[in-house]
Image (cartoon, grey):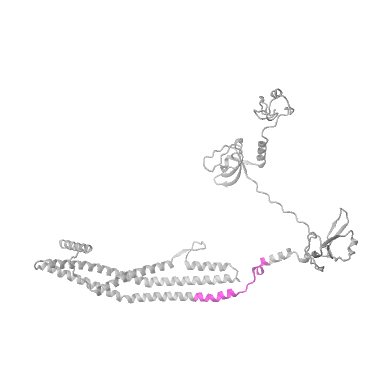
């Protein structure tokens, strides 16, 4: 116990001197070759740990499954999820769709590459990862030997310093020095031997790295093969000639036929004689656009008579303004006999057929009925956003809230002082405090508010009277104290009613 304690104190003093820069008389030094080998081994150790961690991160990331993008609650690999999404898109398109075919082929290729990727990653995890793990286990032994060498070198240094400080020969000190030297040399030899063995173990690590390379090369070659096979598919899809959707789809043909049925042909479209038709400066036989058939002339009743007449459009030979060119003129025949009469210098133009009946105007859309509620109890607004109600208030409902609460806007207040102040106020109120109300009830209440006061009694005469006579009369409101109004005749200054 005492010897072990002494060795500990000696190592502590030696280490303290090294940290403080005090020369403790260390004389044990290693060769430069050993230092180079030690540095190389330390580098090999740290770099192997980095490669092992990176390989695990790479393999685990490729083997990680995520939720499928189609919300099926399935766990899929990333590349597998992409391929299945493409296949699903292509399967939903028509069979003759080039885009659908390309999506199906590309999605299947992505799924095959996902399977090959899984095989490659599993091969790497079963081959190179365990080899790197074995190398890290060997480095653990190397670290333990390195610590052992440092400990024994400290003991050897302390024994050597003690031996040098001895004034006379001391066999015990000499024996301790010799024992410490032997222990240090044994640790030195073990560490050097272990570092050399670790260099020889490179062959196994090299073989596993080559296997990883072959697996990765095979994976990428298979991917390139699958992708190259898609080149011909994309070429065919890009060169495919496909008719427009309006021609190949039954719905498109039905729309074309309906459009053709609704389209008015050029020769069957009526032209109104009220709009001017532009002509050239010289008379010609140019036909009217949108001409109706000549067999149906446009007829009307002239001057309220029962005799129908025709409207024909003729081109004048000349006009007072020579630069303006011929101007179309509308001539009305007095009778059917005038049809065969042709004026000299005039060119007859085919008559215009009757217009079609004017369609009836569309029925205006009826506005949505308001939902009115009338307060049957007084409601106090205790929280922000609630609508205070008095008994008799009418509210238009704008929104239905849960738990039998409604949101509405006050349109009528039973308290006259609140009519203008709270008109249009919106808030929440309980449904059970109100009852349904109709528009007629609201209109009657609003009309009563506009009238101002109850109608006067029939016994009150409208003839002017003196102040004494008006004082004897009774007002409609029940008061009998009449004070004449200086500004309005027949008005009371107290109740502002007619007396």
Residue 135 lies, in percent from the top left, at 32, 71
Residue 197 lies, in percent from the top left, at 28, 75
Number of numbered discs overlaid on the protein picture: 0
Q: Quadrant of the C terminus?
A: top right
Q: Residue at x 60, y 35 (%)?
A: 417
User: Is 447 situated above or below 197?
Assistant: above
Residue 28 vs residue 235, the one in the foreground: 28
Q: In terms of image quadrants, where is residue 413? A: top right
Q: Majority secondary structure of the magenta segment?
A: helix
User: Is 445 situated above or below 147?
Assistant: above
| Left or right for 67, reference 90 | left
Q: Residue at x 73, y 54 (%)?
A: 361
Q: Quadrant of the N terminus?
A: bottom left
Residue 244 lies, in percent from the top left, at 64, 70
Which region shows up in magenta?
A: 225-252
Residue 126 lies, in percent from the top left, at 38, 71
The outermost residue toward the left is: 168
Residue 189 vs residue 494, the one in the foreground: 494
Q: In terms of image quadrants, where is residue 150? A: bottom left
């Amino acid at each position: 116990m005492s010897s072990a304690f002494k060795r500990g104190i000696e190592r502590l003093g030696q280490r303290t001197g090294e940290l403080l820069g005090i020369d403790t008389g260390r004389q044990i030094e290693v060769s430069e070759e050993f230092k180079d080998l030690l540095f190389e081994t330390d580098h090999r150790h740290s770099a192997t740990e980095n490669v092992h961690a990176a390989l695990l991160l790479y393999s685990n990331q490729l083997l990680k499954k995520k939720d499928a993008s189609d919300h099926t609650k399935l766990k899929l690999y990333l590349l597998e999820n992409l391929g299945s999404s493409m296949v699903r898109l292509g399967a939903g398109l028509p069979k003759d769709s080039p885009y659908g075919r390309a999506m199906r082929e590309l999605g299947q290729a992505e799924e095959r590459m996902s399977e090959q990727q899984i095989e490659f990653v599993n091969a790497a995890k079963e081959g190179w990862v365990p080899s790197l793990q074995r190398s890290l286990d060997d480095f653990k032994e190397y670290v333990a030997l390195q610590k052992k060498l440092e400990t024994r070198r400290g003991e050897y240094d302390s024994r050597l310093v003690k031996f040098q400080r001895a004034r006379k020969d001391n066999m015990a000190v000499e024996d301790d020095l010799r024992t410490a030297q032997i222990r240090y040399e044994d640790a030195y030899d073990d560490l050097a031997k272990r570092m050399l063995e670790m260099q020889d173990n490179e062959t196994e690590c090299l073989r596993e790295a080559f296997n990883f390379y072959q697996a990765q090369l095979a994976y990428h070659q298979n991917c390139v093969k699958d992708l190259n096979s898609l080149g011909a598919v994309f070429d065919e899809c890009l060169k495919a000639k496909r008719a427009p959707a309006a021609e190949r789809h039954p719905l498109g043909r039905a729309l074309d036929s309906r459009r053709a049925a609704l389209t008015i042909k050029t020769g069957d479209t009526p032209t109104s004689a009220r709009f001017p038709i532009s002509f050239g400066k010289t008379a010609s036989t140019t036909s009217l656009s949108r001409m109706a058939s000549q067999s149906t002339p446009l007829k009307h009743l002239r001057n309220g008579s029962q005799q129908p007449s025709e409207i024909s459009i003729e081109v004048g030979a000349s006009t007072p303004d020579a630069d303006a060119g011929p101007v179309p003129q509308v001539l009305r025949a007095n009778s059917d006999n005038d049809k065969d009469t042709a004026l000299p210098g005039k060119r007859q133009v085919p008559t215009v057929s009757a217009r079609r009946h004017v369609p009836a105007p569309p029925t205006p859309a009826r506005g949505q009925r308001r939902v009115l509620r009338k307060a049957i109890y007084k409601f106090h607004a205790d929280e922000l956003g609630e609508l205070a109600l008095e008994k008799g208030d009418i509210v238009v409902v704008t929104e239905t809230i849960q738990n039998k609460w409604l949101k509405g806007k006050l349109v009528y207040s039973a308290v006259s002082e609140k009519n203008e102040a709270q008109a249009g106020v919106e808030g929440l109120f309980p449904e059970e405090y109100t009852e349904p109300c109709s528009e007629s009830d609201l209109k009657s209440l609003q009309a009563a508010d506009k009238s101002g006061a109850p109608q006067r009694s029939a016994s009150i005469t409208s003839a002017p009277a003196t102040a004494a006579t008006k004082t004897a009369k009774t007002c409609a409101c029940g008061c009998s104290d009449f004070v004449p109004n200086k500004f309005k005749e027949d008005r009371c200054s107290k109740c502002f009613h007619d007396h």
